[in-house]
Image (spheres, rainbow, N blue to C red):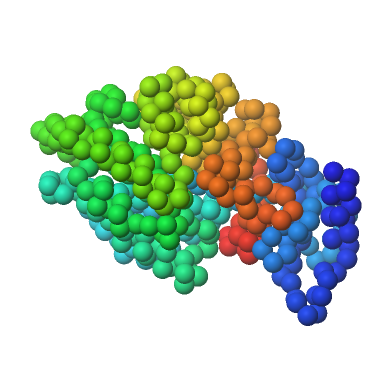
């Protein structure tokens, strides 16, 4: 520790080598409350060419620095599962917004709430035999547009793909075959929305959701239930096998979704799942930890005090030490607020922030971000706490201010 501190002090005090021959982009963020991997300290960061070059945890004055006025300075947030892009693409039922504009707006919104890395969730697996299902293929086309905008430098933050493989569908295998290792697929999650299973074990809750969001009639709802259950019986097993193989082919992290029983968790573990998205019961969450699977829960669940589907409350899992990662799910701004809530709940702000930074980065194999340490990407968020709320005052991606 003393050796690292001495190295950092020298780095702040001296000009960079060969500065005239190789000018560097430098920024100093000073007078900040730094959220380090295991502690929170007052200090300053030196950012050089998109990375954290040094950390000063003293009280030195840094001329020309950005004064953070004591605000929290933490790693940029890492979002593994968000439905936010779908909301921009379809702002109203059956309203298809221009995708380029939707992706850019989605990207800007995430930057504005401190998210610096996102895994854009796209469903693969469609229902084509029922025109009323409104459940057609879209993932390949949207993925191409995301990757093209990224290549053109139109996006502020770092984007990866998260393919949500819907096993209760008709076209999953064909859609998976349209993707490959070059597509920046970081996560593939096994989704099973068969009525009466997993998230919607209570079919009444599914009825409330579909009639509230889509206005379906009782007859159409029952038809949907019958068709989905028949699909699951006919194709579910083959689709699950194909999705696990696709994750290996892409080099993607495999995630389970809505595990409900210990038996389902065992199946997820056999498949090689690393992350469990939104387990629905305490028993499933405990089984995940028993099998070394990280538990991810939704930030809206924590903020609202419970699940909108009637499943386990995320706060209960947090109190039991069974919560590892948080996702904003359908409310991007909830991610930062929840990390601070968990820091307060646990009495350990570094641990709370890790649920949206270091732990998700580790789970998906991104060792270059998620921690304030020398050498890491300078993806950073400055936050003030005002009347208990999180007020974002700056977002940096690779040392460049983006919000």
* Residue at x 40%, y 35% (from the top left corner): 271
Q: In this view, does 223 lie to the left or right of 237?
A: left
Q: In which quarter of the image is residue 148?
A: bottom left
Q: Is residue 315 visible?
A: no
Q: State the count of labels.
A: 0
Residue 97 shown left or right of residue 289 in the figure: left
Residue nearest the observer in this picture, 174 or 302:
174
Q: Quadrant of residue 46?
A: bottom right
- Front in this rendered view, residue 305 or 312: 312
Q: In what quadrant of the picture does the C terminus appear?
A: bottom right
Q: Position of residue 307 (x, y in %)?
A: 41, 29
- Is residue 86 toward the left or the right of residue 318 in the image? left
Indicate the position of residue 100 as horizontal and vertical percent values.
37, 66
Residue 171 seen anywhere in this rendered image of the structure: yes
On the rendered image, what quadrant is the N terminus found in? top right
Instruction: Classify 52 as above or below 372.
Output: below
Report the residue that reaches farthest toward the top: 283
Is residue 359 or residue 106 the one in the foreground? 359
Residue shown at 34% from the left, 57% from the top? 179
Q: Residue 254 placed where, x, y %?
A: 43, 41
**Frontmost residue, 206 versus 244:** 244
Point 43% across, 39% down: residue: 255
Q: Residue furthest left?
A: 219
Query: Residue shown at 22%/42% (left/top)?
Result: 169
Q: Is residue 38 above or below residue 248?
A: above
Residue sitting at the far bottom: 21
């Amino acid at each position: 520790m003393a050796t690292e501190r001495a190295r950092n002090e020298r780095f702040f005090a001296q000009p960079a080598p060969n500065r005239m021959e190789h000018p560097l982009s430098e920024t100093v963020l000073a007078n900040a409350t730094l959220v380090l991997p295991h502690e929170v300290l007052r200090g300053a960061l030196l950012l050089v060419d998109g990375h954290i070059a040094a950390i000063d945890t003293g009280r030195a004055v840094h001329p020309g620095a950005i004064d953070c006025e004591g605000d929290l300075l933490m790693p940029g947030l890492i979002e593994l599962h968000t439905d936010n892009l779908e909301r921009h693409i379809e702002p109203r039922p059956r309203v298809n917004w221009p995708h380029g504009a939707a992706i850019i707006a989605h990207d800007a919104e995430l930057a504005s709430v401190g998210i610096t890395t996102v895994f854009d969730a796209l469903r693969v697996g469609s229902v084509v035999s029922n025109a009323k299902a409104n459940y057609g293929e879209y993932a390949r086309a949207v993925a191409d547009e995301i990757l093209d905008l990224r290549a053109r430098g139109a996006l502020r933050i770092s984007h990866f793909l998260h393919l949500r493989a819907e096993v209760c569908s008709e076209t999953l295998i064909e859609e998976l075959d349209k993707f490959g290792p070059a597509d920046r697929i970081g996560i593939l999650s096994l989704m099973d929305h068969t009525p009466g299973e997993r998230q919607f074990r209570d079919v009444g809750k599914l009825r409330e959701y579909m009639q509230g969001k889509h206005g379906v009639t009782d007859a159409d709802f029952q038809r949907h239930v019958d068709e989905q259950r028949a699909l699951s019986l006919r194709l579910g097993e083959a689709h699950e096998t194909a999705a696990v193989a696709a994750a290996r082919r892409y080099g993607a992290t495999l995630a389970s979704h809505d595990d409900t029983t210990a038996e389902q968790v065992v199946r997820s573990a056999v498949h090689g799942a690393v992350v469990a998205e939104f387990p629905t019961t305490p028993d499933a969450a405990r089984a995940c930890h028993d099998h070394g699977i990280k538990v991810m829960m939704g930030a809206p669940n924590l903020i609202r005090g419970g699940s909108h589907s009637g499943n386990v409350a995320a706060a209960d899992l947090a109190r039991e030490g069974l919560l590892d990662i948080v996702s904003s799910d359908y409310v991007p701004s909830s991610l930062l607020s929840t990390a601070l809530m968990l820091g307060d709940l646990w009495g350990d702000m570094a641990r709370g922030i890790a649920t949206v930074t270091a732990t998700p980065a580790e789970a998906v194999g991104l060792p270059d971000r998620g921690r304030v340490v020398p050498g890491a990407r300078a993806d950073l968020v400055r936050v003030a706490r005002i009347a208990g709320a999180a007020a974002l005052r700056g977002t940096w991606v690779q040392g460049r201010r983006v919000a």
